[in-house]
Image: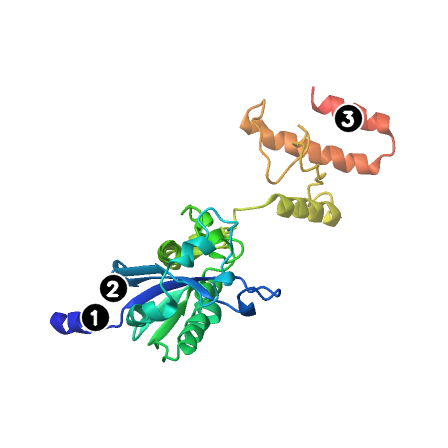
């Protein structure tokens, strides 16, 4: 059974990461106003181990040499002088066909750009284009699976997000960077799927609050206010004055959530509480503040 599994895995199509560098079509007529392939680069990858098995890269002389810029704005950009002595696409078509045909094509934004340019280049020389058995566009896959947590989904931005250096915009360097970006993204997504409530992007941890002994500050204030407004019978309810949130209760107030050391023995605490209750009850029956103060002084002597 293991041998059959190994045979099936070995017969699985290999993955080829490829990238094209082209000119930027100009409206002024340079290069015929269309795309010309200036460089092709590809690596063949084992789908089981994601290790590089084969690589190929070449500069390509366009049919219209004016399509290549005399100077490049990039440090390692492709110039007209660099491709002047390079082979034409027709001269390297067999090698490119062998690299691509019958394999899974992979790359960043290949469905909208690189795959279209390959088809155009083979059509220009009158030859059938290579065909893939499948395609993996990392731009679409990462946008859907990884999201925009790294900003835009350009390869340069993703590489910077993972600390992989700067994109060189050279075919072979870019496809290798593409593979490393996919590995890093896959690792992050794997870890997040293992602990979705902890590691998932944007996830927040919810703490259990099912215990009846847990009372939040807002809830405690609500309870105090309810008891204060519902205390109609002074003999059955203790009149509690709510205190501000940021200030601790005074020595003569009662709180549901605040406790402080008492300067007297616990045995006399019940007597003091009862005295305070009786004092407040008598205070409701009198209108004289002088009598209230006199009663309070006699109680705490």
The residue located at (68%, 33%) in the rendering is 253
Disc 1 marks which residue?
9
Foreground tag (2 vs 3): 2
Q: Residues within 10 Å of mark 1 (few under 14, many from 20)?
A: some
Query: Residue 269: image x %, image y %?
Result: 59, 30
Quarter of the image where one finds residue 2 = bottom left
| Mark closer to the chain start, 2 or 3 | 2
Q: Is residue 117 left or right of residue 46?
A: right
The residue located at (45%, 71%) in the rendering is 117
Mark 3: which secondary structure? helix
Q: Residues within 10 Å of mark 2 (few under 14, many from 20)?
A: few
Query: Residue 124: image x %, image y %?
Result: 43, 76
Mark 1: which secondary structure? helix
User: Which residue occupies the extreme top position in the image?
Assistant: 301
Indicate whether 118 appears above or below 284: below
Disc 3 marks which residue?
295
Residue 183 shows in this picture:
no
Quarter of the image where one finds residue 252 = top right
- Please report contact status of discs 2 and 3: CB closer than 8 Å, yes or no: no
Q: Residues within 10 Å of mark 3 (few under 14, many from 20)?
A: some
The residue located at (72%, 35%) in the rendering is 278
Query: Residue 110 versus residue 122: which sits nearer the camera?
Result: 122
Disc 2 marks which residue?
48
- Please report contact status of discs 1 and 2: CB closer than 8 Å, yes or no: yes
Query: Residue 190: image x %, image y %?
Result: 36, 58
| Mark closer to the chain start, 1 or 3 | 1
Query: Residue 164 versus residue 201: which sits nearer the camera?
Result: 164
Query: Residue 95 versus residue 180: which sits nearer the camera?
Result: 95
Residue 215 shows in this picture:
yes
């Amino acid at each position: 059974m293991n041998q059959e599994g190994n045979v099936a895995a070995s017969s699985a199509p290999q993955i080829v990461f490829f990238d094209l560098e082209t000119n930027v079509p100009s409206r002024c007529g340079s290069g015929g106003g269309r795309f010309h392939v200036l460089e092709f680069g590809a690596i063949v990858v084992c789908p089981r181990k994601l290790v590089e098995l084969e690589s190929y890269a070449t500069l390509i002389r366009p049919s219209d040499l004016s399509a290549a810029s005399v100077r490049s704005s990039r440090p390692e950009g492709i110039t007209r002088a660099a491709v002047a002595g390079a082979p034409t696409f027709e001269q390297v078509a067999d090698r490119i066909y062998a690299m691509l045909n019958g394999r899974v094509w992979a790359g960043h934004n290949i469905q909208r750009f690189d795959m279209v340019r390959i088809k155009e280049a083979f059509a220009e020389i009158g030859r059938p284009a290579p065909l893939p058995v499948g395609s993996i566009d990392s731009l679409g896959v990462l946008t859907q699976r990884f999201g925009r947590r790294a900003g835009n989904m350009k390869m340069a931005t993703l590489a910077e997000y993972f600390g992989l250096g700067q994109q060189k915009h050279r075919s072979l360097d870019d496809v290798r960077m593409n593979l490393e970006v996919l590995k890093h993204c896959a690792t992050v997504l794997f870890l997040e799927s293992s602990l979705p409530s902890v590691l998932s992007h944007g996830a927040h941890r919810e703490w259990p609050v099912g215990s009846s002994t847990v009372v939040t500050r807002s809830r405690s204030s609500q309870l105090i206010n309810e008891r204060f407004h519902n205390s109609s019978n002074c003999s059955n309810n203790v009149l509690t004055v709510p205190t501000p949130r940021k200030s601790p209760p005074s020595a003569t107030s009662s709180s549901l959530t605040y406790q402080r050391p008492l300067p007297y023995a616990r045995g006399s605490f019940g007597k003091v509480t009862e005295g305070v209750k009786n004092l407040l009850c008598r205070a409701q029956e009198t209108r004289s503040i002088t009598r209230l103060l006199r009663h309070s002084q006699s109680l705490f002597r």
